[in-house]
Amino acid sequence: MKKIIALFCALIALVSCNIETLGPETPSDGKIKVNLTIGRADDFTETKATVKSTWADDDVVFVFFKGVAAPKYLEMKYSGGSWTATGKNGLAASDLSDAADKRMTAIYLPYGSTATVVNDGGAFKFQDGFGNDLFYKGYFLQAELVDYTFAGELKGTLNMVAPALANLSDKLIHFDISGFTAGHDYALYQDYVKPLTFGSVSADGIVSKTEGSMRKPLTGYADGSMMNFSGILDASAVDVAKNYHFSVWDDTAGKLYTREASTKTVSKAMYIGIGDISAPATWNVYEQDVDFVYLGFNNASGERIMWARKNLGATVEQGEGSYGLYYAWGETTGHSLTGTFGTYTCDHNFNTDMTVAWDASRILLPEYDAAHVALKGIWRLPTNTEFESLKSNTDNPGFSRGSVNSGKTWTSTVPGYESKSVFLPAAGSIYGTTLYVNEGSSGGYWTSYINVDGHKYWYQFNSSNISNSTNYGGGSQGYTIRPVFSVE
């Protein structure tokens, strides 16, 4: 794996231009002479090609003028060490000279140079080359509203800087991978990183952006032989030693790549190289319909739920070795049928201290999620509502009791997915320090949810019934786990 490069760059590439806008897009009432200084300051102590911390050929800076109606703007395009200015959508000299408030702003999208700008109720909205709204996910630079002068020539200085974050303790962070397949759509997931999305520019020159939630996807952008991802490292992980897990979802191929990148302490804006995704010694690879299955239904957030084909710790889907390991709720160390199952063996006793174990949605934190700890990345326990979705969107016939092959095959009833199914063995459960397993007769599977009364949710089924149950203790009951992950 590439070593971490910690960086902070000073003001880079102060350039100016004095260029007439020529060609078919020249404003009808005369040429606009442009003399703009475009500077940039990136919060990185060293440069790296994949974060585009120096100007590159075909980079575009979009310049907007307060009081000049959308979608008129000025395009500044970089090539060969200089800039070319072009008025867009009929931008005219009179627009600049007549503006009562002569201030401007600018946007630089490192991988959005082909974007076009349209009018959206007076705001400047960006679109891709196919007319789709462009919500650019990744690192971008903006210039605050600054003064300009126009007396036959546009003059001013644009200082391009990274956008200010809502929490000043958060940090911008970049990742890249190599070995990707050209033309595929990739998303990166990381426990402590949230996406940064550029939206639009208002008629007053105010830039809108959205800071997403942790464990949501970062969009990948191809840059030479690398795929670049950018986001926001949450303040909770800044200056704290964290074990970094990565998941890369190849939406085109239906493959999930996961890896562990060891413990790191990140204290400032950083670049991290996370290696060659095609290296099997570094990355684990899971394939759709081989290692997991999509049954055609989504969770409440609109994400596709992918169900693992095997229980956590199992070696096969059905038959001898299909049960896997048994866990207490929130425990990450599993127990086999031949072992001795006691009460909690993890550091946190959820029966006596229930203050730090879950998030605001009452879902287990990743460090207490056995599927996440064992499989890394975005693998996790299903929520109670996701198990309800499995129940309501599948047909699950009964089974014969008493056999190691017993269980339920959950076959999708979603149109177009009727051929998709997942098998859950009837692995029974363990109670107390004594093995007490109704194997072959019933199945018990944990969810990651705990209600306000401290009851942990699990799903049980037998040959005739499927139901959810709650358990207040959870420290002396061992059930099996069926891992899932979800992607947008």
Image (cartoon, grey):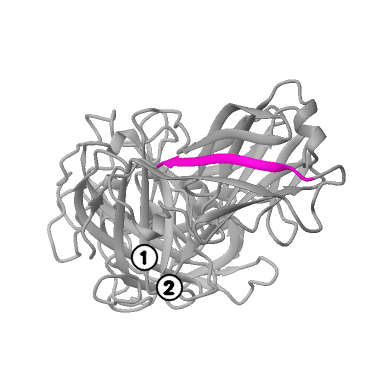
Residue labelled with disc 1: 177
**Quarter of the figure that contains the N terminus:** bottom left
Tags 1 and 2 touching, CB below 8 Å: yes
**Is-magenta flag for residue 311?**
no
Q: Residue at x 35, y 40 (%)?
A: 43
Query: In the figure, is residue 174 to the left or right of 474?
Result: right
Give the main secondary structure of the magenta stretch. strand
Residue labelled with disc 2: 180
Residue neighbourhood size for the residue with mark 1, other residues' Cα within 10 Å, grouped as few (<14), some (14–19), many (≥20) = many
Across and down, in percent, residue 162 comes to: 45, 38
Q: Residue at x 58, y 27 (%)?
A: 146
Rendered image quadrant of residue 235: top left
Q: Residue at x 45, y 41 (%)?
A: 40
Question: Which secondary structure, mark 2?
Answer: loop
Q: Nearer the viewer, residue 248 or 341?
A: 248
Going by the numbered disc 1, the residue's amino acid type is: Ile
Q: Nearer the viewer, residue 462 or 385?
A: 385
Residue neighbourhood size for the residue with mark 2, other residues' Cα within 10 Å, grouped as few (<14), some (14–19), many (≥20) = some
**Is-magenta flag for residue 39?**
yes
Which segment did they paint magenta? 31-41
Q: Nearer the viewer, residue 159 or 189?
A: 159
Q: Is residue 128 above or below residue 421?
A: above
Across and down, in percent, residue 113 comes to: 60, 56
Q: Residue furthest top?
A: 100
Going by the numbered disc 2, the residue's amino acid type is: Phe
Q: Is residue 288 above or below residue 151?
A: below
Q: Residue at x 54, y 36 (%)?
A: 158
Q: Is residue 256 above or below residue 70?
A: below
Q: Is residue 291 above or below residue 381?
A: below
Across and down, in percent, residue 463 comes to: 48, 65
